[in-house]
Image (spheres, grey):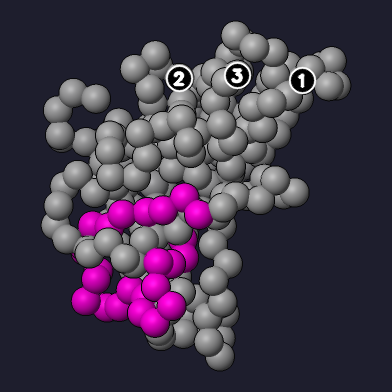
């Protein structure tokens, strides 16, 4: 059965932590920041707050702050503090900051799907190579990321790429992403994240 392109971002797979906390650490996000979805890779701006898809430096630029898990903020609509698995931005008061949770632990690994090509995915020869990601399109109805490993960017030993291929997902057989060809599923690890990078200053 062929794989179906249905990315959910970089979902926590394993590491030194475990559910329900999954190694979460706190950060802040400004009210003007664009949507951020659960399992999105995110960056930190020079102001110290976390950047959304269209407000951050974007893939290929900068060092990752981590993977976004959720947030709590003072909702203008509900007139109370609200927890959400995604950052909607527009429901918060201008000029305010809200709390977010990230995974940035160096040993953390993530499940993600490969996109960027309708004919090829990642293969065994890509193990140990570094790769780029793309944001795709997050879903506001469930708050889940549309980010994926970007097959259109060559895998390489380049240390400025954000992630490394740890393994191909092959079990259970027949599950989406386990077939060869496009839209394979992989387990990825951080290469270029604030807590791990050797590339110098942020």
Q: CA distance from mark 3 to mark 2?
A: 10 Å
Q: Residues within 10 Å of mark 2 (few under 14, many from 20)?
A: some
Of residues 170 and 79, the one nearer the viewer is 79
The numbered disc on residue 64 is none
Residue at image point 58% right, 14% down: 97
Of residues 88 and 108, the one nearer the viewer is 88
Residue stretch in magenta? 112-136
Q: Which residue is mark 3?
A: 31
Q: Residue furthest right?
A: 78
Q: Residues within 10 Å of mark 3 (few under 14, many from 20)?
A: some
Q: Quadrant location of the N terminus?
A: bottom right
Give whichever of discs 1 and 3 has the lower sequence position. Answer: 3
Q: Residue furthest front?
A: 54
Residue 4 place in picture, x, y as percent: 56, 77
Residue 184 is one of the magenta-drawn residues: no
Residue at image point 58% right, 67% down: 6
Task: Using the rendered image of the protein, determine whether residue 67 is visible from the camera's viewpoint.
Answer: no
Asked if 150 appears above or below 60 in the picture, the reply is below
Residue 48 place in picture, x, y as percent: 40, 16
Q: Residue furthest bottom?
A: 1
Asked if 24 appears above or below 131 in the picture, the reply is above
Q: Which residue is mark 2?
A: 49
Counting labels gives: 3
Task: Using the rendered image of the protein, determine whether residue 174 is visible from the camera's viewpoint.
Answer: yes
Q: Which residue is mark 1?
A: 75
Left or right: 30 as drawn, with respect to 144: left
Residue at image point 60% right, 50% down: 138
User: Does the CB distance between marks 3 and 2 fall below 8 Å?
Assistant: no
- Given this view, does label 3 or label 2 mark the residue nearer the observer? 3
Left or right: 159 as drawn, with respect to 66: left
Give whichever of discs 2 and 1 has the lower sequence position. Answer: 2
């Amino acid at each position: 059965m062929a794989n179906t392109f249905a990315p959910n971002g970089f979902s926590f797979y394993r590491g030194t932590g475990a559910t329900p906390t999954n190694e979460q650490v706190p950060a802040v996000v400004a009210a003007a920041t664009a949507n951020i979805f659960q399992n999105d890779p995110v960056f930190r701006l020079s102001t110290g707050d976390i950047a959304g898809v269209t407000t951050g430096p974007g893939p290929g630029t900068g060092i990752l702050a981590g993977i976004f898990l959720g947030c709590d903020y003072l909702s203008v609509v509900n007139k109370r503090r609200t927890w959400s698995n995604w950052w909607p931005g527009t429901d918060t008061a201008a000029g305010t900051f809200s709390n977010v949770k990230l995974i940035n632990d160096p040993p953390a690994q993530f499940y993600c799907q490969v996109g960027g090509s309708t004919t090829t995915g990642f293969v065994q020869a890509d193990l140990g190579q570094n790769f780029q990601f793309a944001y795709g399109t997050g879903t506001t109805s469930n708050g889940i990321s549309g980010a994926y490993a970007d097959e259109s960017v060559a895998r390489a030993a380049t240390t400025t790429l954000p992630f490394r291929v740890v393994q191909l997902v092959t079990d259970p057989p027949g599950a989406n992403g386990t077939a060869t060809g496009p839209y394979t599923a992989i387990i990825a690890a951080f290469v270029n994240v604030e807590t791990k990078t050797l590339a110098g200053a942020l």
